[in-house]
Amino acid sequence: MAKDETPLIAIKPGNKVTVKRIHGGLNMKIRLNEMGITCNSEINVVRNDGWGPVIISLSMTRLAIGRQMANKILVEKKN
Amino acid sequence: MPITTEVVALIGNPNTGKTSLFNCLTGAKQKIGNWPGVTVEKKEGTLSNNKNTNIVDLPGTYSLDTCSADELVARNFILIDKPDTVINVVDATNLKRNLYLTIQLLEMGANLILALNMMDEAKNNKINIDILKLSFLLKMPVVPTTARNNHGITELINVLKLNKPQNLNFHINYGEAIENVLQEIENILISSNLPFLPFSTRFLALKMLENDNSILKMIENTSELKNALAICEKSRKELLTLLGEKLDTIFIEKRYEYIDTLLQQTVKVEKSLASITTSDKIDKIILNKYAGLPIYLLTMLAIFKFTFTVSTPLSHCLEILLTWLGNWIQNLIPDGLLSSFLIEGLIGGMGAIIVFLPTILCLYLAISLLENSGYMSRGAYIMDRFMRNIGLEGKAFIPLVIGFGCNVPAILATKTLENPKDKMITILITPLMSCSARLPVYALFISAFFSQHQGLILFSLYFLGIVLAIIMAKIFRVFFFPGDITPLVMELPPYRLPAIKSTFIQMWQEGSSFLKKVGTIVFAVVILAWALSNFPWGVEYAGPNSLIGKIGSFIAPLLAPLGFGTREAASALLFGTVAKEVVVSTLGVLYSASQGGLVNVISQTWTPLSSLSFMVMTLIYVPCAATIGAIKTETGSWKWAAFSVLYTFSLAWIIAFLVYQGGLLLGWGL
């Protein structure tokens, strides 16, 4: 993991991040891709309760992502 | 001149208002069935003002990468059945993701019309779309619509009439390295004098390079293509080293790049989209860490209450009507085989089905309101964390809760589960939820023996059902449907007011198609039960000499280790498979006692332990005929319906055995 890359699961709500890498199988990657989450897409973390799925926003869309999956999405915080 | 029927397919992402648009185009006249070989629902209708235009509603899907049965159905229909026109419904507020499917459709060579739906929301969010330019750049008609308010439908129909088949050769540039390989494969395809294939060489070359399983299967026996496939294999490896990334990812990224360029030229957004929307504000409360769960449970309770409060009096009215009809026939036709068949068989059978109709309509109304308002996916989000512990996804909670009212609509509600494994497991464990029809049986035995502890006994029975459901869910996951629980990625669509007309059309369609599909099965079982209790003709109804009586005596010994090895108990359980509440009325007939008297007879001839064991048996054993019918409909196979009967019976026998024999050991048998 590069220095400034954090798993999505660790991002607090209200933060804007850029997707850097998606670990995990190809199917998962394709699934995220077709929902609009690709490398370099900018997302906002809307909710992250510490348990249960993370909710992110991607332009007008709101997506719920399971924690397992959120753990494999590496993001970079924006300043 | 023969009239040619034009076929129009409707396709789009979930939550784009595709169903509303379908309802606008076709009106209430629709045919609901299944796609051949799969349980994916197929909806068809004709254009309301032109019967020669057939409209097929394809399953909602985000892409056509064929991971699921839904996507495969949609893709095969477009590739192989080749509809004359494909209307692609897209959400105008969410073009980037929606256009991904559009790009895939264009690559497949579909003759497309883009319906830019939810234009009202796009306007409210200050999203300005240059429709003419979009249409020009994509080289296809683009029609703005708001299906919910019927806006743009006439225009869409006009465009549909004018739309001519086009040969577009839509082309995304995937970069030099990939394009060279594609060209090489295409050359082989062209020179190898292929047998007829229903798609362009460019598309075939693309899919071969992508290693697309379902397309490869179609051509695996074509020897001319061995060479091309070998090149694909080699190129995939070379491109991986050259580009440093898997091809699949590159293809997706290039398509998004194309979309980004397209949107930059056509869409202007006046306010920043990252700002907090009304939906976000509602979510702050509804998805709150602490309040979210209670709100959801209350909503479920409300739906449950609504469904059964509204439907029960309606069902009663229908029953009264049928009784009246029965009496009328009784006065008209003299007693005998014919009148008995008409009254107990025919009308009884119709009654058993019709009483379900109001319940199912109410439930479908509630579910479609939930779905169309956007709350359904919120519920799935809230329950996901809990349901995951028992090995199911969050959405599975809804059918299980409904199961406490009636298993039939509960099993039909598993339609909302996208993952087929999760759906199967949920269907199989739903009969363990103690439905309201089992309550009269508990009431009878509790008032005979346990009036001191009725709350405790009732609670234990419901609780036992839930515990068994959790255990069975785990067992089924391990032995029949192995694999991880689907990781969750789910859209939370903005809250919307559901379109009333569309909601009611949906309710009626689903309800009446249920009657057709399940009705026949229930009817057959009722007629069978009637025949078994009346033959040989002349015996006392369901008496010891009737067929059912003989079967009862025959299987009674099987029930002896459970504490109720009598002909009466066996016959009651047999009849209970028609509908569980029938257990009580059968016992009433067999013990020739009225309700009050029945409690007396039972308290004299049964023991507390045997009645406890019998209640456990009633809870678990064999789903009722209508539930079996619903299981057959939703799983698409008699095999699973039969399995559900066998496993519940075995489980019921084992648990009742443990209760009775365990009780005897503890000395409760006296």
Image (cartoon, grey):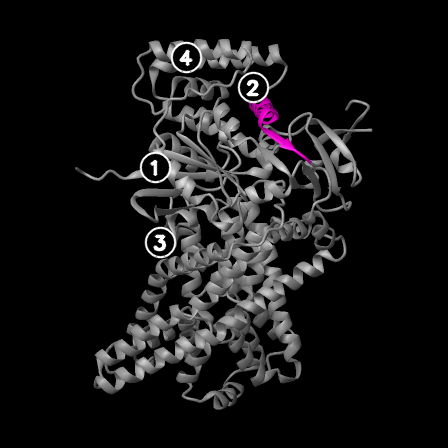
- Determine which residue is flagged by label 4: B186
The answer to whether the residues at label 3 and label 2 have Cβ atoms under 8 Å apart is no
Q: How crowded is the residue under tag 1: few (<14 C-alpha within 10 Å), some, or many (20+)?
A: few
Query: Label 3, label 4: how many angstroms apart (C-alpha)?
Result: 45 Å
Query: Label 2, label 1: how many angstroms apart (C-alpha)?
Result: 40 Å
Q: Earlier in the sequence, mark 2 or mark 1?
A: 1
The answer to whether the residues at label 4 and label 1 have Cβ atoms under 8 Å apart is no
Q: Is residue B183 left or right of residue B394?
A: left
Q: What residue do we see at 44% from left, 69% from top?
A: B558
Instruction: Indicate the position of residue B2 as horizontal and vertical percent values.
Output: 18, 38
Query: Label 3, label 2: how many angstroms apart (C-alpha)?
Result: 45 Å
| Between marks 3 and 4 in the image, the one whose residue lies nearer the viewer | 3
- Determine which residue is flagged by label 2: B247
Subunit of label 2: B
Observer-nearest residue: B26 or B556?
A: B26
Subunit of label 4: B
Query: Label 4, label 2: how many angstroms apart (C-alpha)?
Result: 18 Å
Extent of the magenta region: B247-270
Q: How crowded is the residue under tag 2: few (<14 C-alpha within 10 Å), some, or many (20+)?
A: some
Q: Quadrant of the N terminus of chain B?
A: top left
Instruction: Farthest residue to the left: give it.
Output: B1
| Between marks 1 and 3 in the image, the one whose residue lies nearer the viewer | 1
Instruction: Indicate the position of residue B653 as horizontal and vertical percent values.
Output: 50, 65
- Determine which residue is flagged by label 3: B29
Q: Earlier in the sequence, mark 4 or mark 2?
A: 4
Instruction: Indicate the position of residue B259 as horizontal and vertical percent values.
Output: 57, 25
- Determine which residue is flagged by label 1: B161
